[in-house]
Amino acid sequence: MNQLQIIEREGIRVLTTQQLAEAYGSDSKIINRNFQRNSDRYVQGKHFYALSGEGLREFKGSRQFDDSLKFASILYLWTENGAWLHAKSLNTDEAWKAYATLVDDYYTIKQQVKVLSEREQLVAAMKLSIETSEEIVVIREEVKEVRGMVENQITLDYGEQRRIQKGISKKVYELESDPNVIQQLFRELHREIHDRFAVTSYKDIKRKDMLSAVRYIEAWVPRRVS
């Protein structure tokens, strides 16, 4: 899935019809047709925002869109709930997998926390120039403590994140083949991982906890069958 242009409406992230179609491996016309066929299930403000008139002109003026959207008289922006309904309408493995990725990587707004590298921590510590042997002992103890703190802060690298993501998908597809239930299991497992390891995303799991996370996923049983 390509990097999505971030769009927000009333403080929440949304996607245009074109973005949603590309993410789901579909076409804007199909997305629109499914919406029209099931319009009674969609609630404005919950599943989507429909912009027109002056509101649409102001919205377009503040962003760069494809030429195909410049002359649109109405623009639909889909929330996470709306994206779920469209995944349900398409009902393909590709759409469900894309929906799970959107929930984790786009719709969930994560707080970014800067973590100093071990080298930066050590340099900061060593700048406390010492003149006596007692100070040397103190600095060494501080450096040791800083190293331990840094090791506890290091999160998963890209390869380790992929291992966790694949483990989640493998577990869900082992447990369920019904597309109507699959997305619920994805959400449940992600939520329980977040609670178990006190993180907002599996990507924030500490490296020291990776094997524990892998074993947790492998042994996971959804509440609905537990």
Image (cartoon, rainbow, N blue to C red):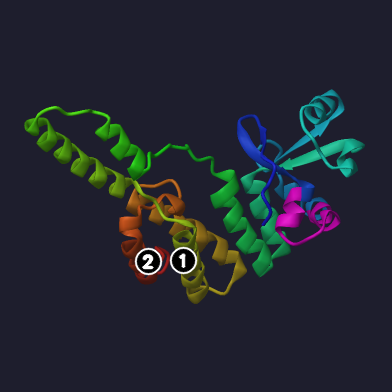
Is residue 84 or residue 165 the one in the foreground?
A: 165
Q: Is residue 135 above or below residue 144?
A: above
In percent of the image, x 37 and y 66: which residue is there?
A: 214
Identity of the residue drawn at 61% across and 52% down: 102
Q: Which residue is found at the position 9% from the left and 29% from the top?
A: 132
The reply, left or right, for residue 37 in relation to residue 14 is right
The residue to which callout 1 is attached is 163
Residue beneath the point at 14% across and 40% down: 141
Indicate the position of residue 76 as horizontal and vertical percent values. 78, 41
Start-end of magenta stretch: 19-34
Label 1 to label 2: alpha-carbon separation: 8 Å
Give coordinates of residue 148: x percent, y percent: 23, 46
**What's the residue type where badge 1 is placed?**
Arg
- The amino acid on which the numbered mark 2 sits, given as a three-letter code, is Val
- 120 or 40: nearer the viewer: 120
How many marks can you see?
Answer: 2
**Residue lying furthest right:** 71
In which quarter of the view is residue 218 placed? Answer: bottom left
The quarter of the picture where the C terminus appears is: bottom left
Q: Toward which corner of the image does residue 139 lie, by quadrant?
A: top left
What secondary structure do most residues of the magenta stretch adopt? Answer: helix
- Horizontally, residue 186 falls left or right of residue 146, namely right
Q: Which residue is mark 2?
A: 214
- In the rendered image, residue 135, in percent from the top left (x then y), is placed at 11, 31
Q: Is residue 29 magenta?
A: yes
Question: Mark 2 and mark 1 in contact (Cβ < 8 Å)?
Answer: yes
